[in-house]
Amino acid sequence: MINSKWNLTLVGGFVLLALASLVLTLALLAGRTGSTDTYYTLYSNVTGLKFGSKVLFEGYPVGQVEEIEPFEHQGQMRFRVRLSVIEGWKIPSDSIARSTASGVLAPQTIEISAGASPQPLSPGATITGGGAGGLMSTVEGLAGNVDELTDEALLPLLKNLNQQVTVLGTILQEDIRPLAQNSNKVMAAAATQVPQILGNLERVSRRTENMLSPQRVEALGRTIDNADRTLASLRSGSQQLEQATPDALAALRELRLTLESLSRRSESIAQNVESSTRNLQEFSRQIRRSPGTLLRAPEPPREDGPPPEVKP
């Protein structure tokens, strides 16, 4: 009898110990092992958040999500999230609470980034909510950007490309086909003239070969040599002309001086020439009147009488 009671006591104690361990384990898993303070934050999207989601302060677990309450604000649906945080935990007033996930398969948590304000929030205050973070949010943002890019760029591009392809098909149908037909006609006409064209090319080739014969090339070389010698002679003549230029300038200066001297004496020279001209005219008149004057000289005049007459 005593052994039976003792066994029941042991079993009952073991069950109570197991229940206490279970309650303690559940409390530890829920993050509530003591008194807590209540805070609130507001979000427009609470994807992945639920009762029991962890609340981290700079990566350290400080509480959990207790309740998510939807409400309408300015015609849009918003969500008020109630948080339970370890009692006495100091949260700066400018802190920001973001809904994040550390990995693809990791649960959604609320990450509180500590602010720089020395003034802490009082229990019951609202923590400023930030934009969703984490890998999934980045992927969702990237997907939104891809959708926007598709709607605003790719679809108009495809539409424009379709229009261009349609225009190209019209061009091929209306322009290229007649052009190809005309090209066929031109090629057919050219095919009949190919022998004549080849003959002309052959004649041109023979004439070119004759023009570039060794004799003509040699003659061309001699012409170039002669041109080189002519250029050398011209350069030599130019050098001689440059050397003679100072002498020519000196001669011009002397000629200018001579002309200036003649200009100064031109009046007296003209008078002498005029006087000589009159004397020659007088002499010529006397010769015509009395040719014998050239053979005899007139007698000198007498001092005591009149001069003798000269007979013609």
Image (cartoon, rainbow, N blue to C red):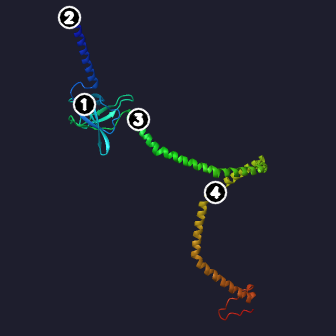
Q: Residue drawn 52% across and 45% down?
A: 158
| Residue 303 image offset from top left, x and y in percent | 65, 92
How far apart marks 4 and 3 lie (CA) works out to 87 Å
- The image quarter containing residue 307 is bottom right
Q: Is residue 284 above or below residue 157?
A: below
User: Which callout, 2 or 3, points at the residue further toward the start of the chain?
Assistant: 2
> Are the two marked residues, 1 and 4, in contact with CB atoms closer than 8 angstroms?
no
Which residue does the numbered mark 1 point to in the structure image? 84
Q: Secondary structure at mark 4?
A: helix
**Three-letter code, disc 2:** Ile
How far apart marks 2 and 1 lie (CA) works out to 50 Å
Q: Secondary structure at mark 1?
A: strand
Category of crowding for the residue at label 3, using alpha-carbon neighbours closer than 10 angstroms: few (below 14), some (14–19), many (at least 20): few
Disc 4 vs disc 3: which is toward the camera?
Answer: 3
Q: Which mark is residue 139?
A: 3
Disc 2 vs disc 4: which is toward the camera?
Answer: 2
How far apart marks 1 and 4 lie (CA) works out to 110 Å
Residue 30 lies left or right of residue 245; in this view the side is left
**Three-letter code, disc 1:** Ser
Which residue does the numbered mark 4 point to in the structure image? 238
Which residue does the numbered mark 2 point to in the structure image? 2
